[in-house]
């Protein structure tokens, strides 16, 4: 089977290269052929440079594609391209969610050898940050998985056939509203996938769950530049018309 890993990113030049390299180094079952794509919404840093695009271009083994503004729009474009190019499996992997074991990609792919499986969830954990915020992030995440299951935005896979049937995401919503985006691409999509097949929770597909979102909920602990994006001012959106060159 042919699988493609698609990494949507915006303003993440500080982490994207390490994550892309870590993903590229993951072994996977011989039953699969795997390609790698970085779908970058151009951002302009204070020097007028598209630093995320430049960083992604420097990683060998990846195809770099300019994505439209908006997380949902970027994913729609990427997944539609995968269907058009005949892939069987589509894996979405965030730039800030590197794999934490050598078996993460294998655990994501192996369930797709079953005909009933339409999607596979990773297991995001904040364990590498053994502080109170990291533990709190894991506790909240595990509880949410039990009482309000959803596709993990950090990393998950689905069949191209499932996307062809259920996609695209509703890109008419406010894509600067992270809660609205998450409701569409994680919670609602989980329900729709579960209605047509089996969604597998792959406990060995462990990826990093960055605690910066949790820290934004605690006064004085969050990174102001990221928390501003979380508040809905900027997220996967060009800072200037046309982006940077």
Image (tube, rainbow, N blue to C red):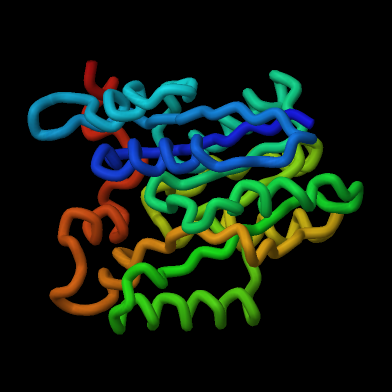
Q: Nearer the viewer, residue 208 or 142?
A: 208
239 on left or right of 79: left
State which quarter of the image contains the C terminus: top left
Q: Position of residue 43 (x, y in %)?
A: 26, 32
Q: Position of residue 41 (x, y in %)?
A: 37, 31
85 on left or right of 6: right
Please tell me whether residue 207 is drawn above or below residue 90 in the rendered image: below
State which quarter of the image contains the N terminus: top right
Please tell me whether residue 66 is drawn above or below residue 139 in the rendered image: above
Taking the view exactly as shown, the residue that stands out farthest to the left is 47
63 on left or right of 160: left
Please tell me whether residue 133 is drawn above or below residue 224 in the rendered image: below
Residue pictured at 59% horizontal, 53% vertical: 104
Residue pictured at 69% horizontal, 33% vertical: 3
Residue pictured at 51% horizontal, 28% vertical: 37
Quadrant in the picture for residue 241: top left
Quadrant in the picture for residue 223: bottom left
Quadrant in the picture for residue 14: top left
Q: Nearer the viewer, residue 152 or 227?
A: 152
Q: Position of residue 47 (x, y in %)?
A: 8, 28
Residue 181 seen in render: no
Residue pictured at 64% horizontal, 81% vertical: 147
Q: Position of residue 188 (x, y in %)?
A: 65, 59
């Amino acid at each position: 089977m042919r699988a493609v890993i698609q990494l949507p990113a915006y303003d993440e030049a500080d982490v994207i290269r390490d994550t892309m390299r870590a993903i590229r180094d993951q072994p996977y079952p011989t039953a699969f052929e795997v390609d790698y794509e970085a779908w970058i919404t151009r951002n302009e840093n204070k020097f007028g440079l598209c630093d995320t695009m430049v960083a992604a271009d420097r990683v060998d083994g990846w195809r770099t594609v300019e994505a439209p503004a908006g997380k949902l729009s970027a994913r729609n474009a990427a997944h539609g391209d995968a269907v058009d190019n005949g892939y069987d499996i589509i894996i979405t992997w965030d730039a800030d969610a590197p794999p934490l074991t050598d078996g993460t990609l294998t655990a994501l792919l192996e369930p797709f050898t079953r005909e009933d499986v339409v999607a596979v969830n990773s297991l995001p954990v904040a364990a590498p940050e053994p502080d109170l915020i990291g533990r709190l992030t894991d506790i909240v995440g595990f509880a949410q998985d039990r009482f309000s299951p959803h596709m993990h935005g950090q990393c998950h896979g689905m069949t191209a056939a499932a996307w062809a049937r259920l996609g695209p995401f509703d890109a008419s919503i406010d894509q600067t509203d992270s809660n609205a985006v998450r409701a569409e691409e994680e919670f609602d999509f989980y329900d729709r996938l579960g209605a047509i097949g089996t969604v597998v929770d792959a406990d060995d597909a462990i990826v990093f769950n960055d605690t910066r979102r949790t820290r934004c909920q605690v006064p004085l602990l969050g990174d102001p530049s990221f928390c501003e994006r979380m508040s809905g001012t900027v997220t996967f959106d060009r800072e200037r018309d046309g982006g940077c060159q």
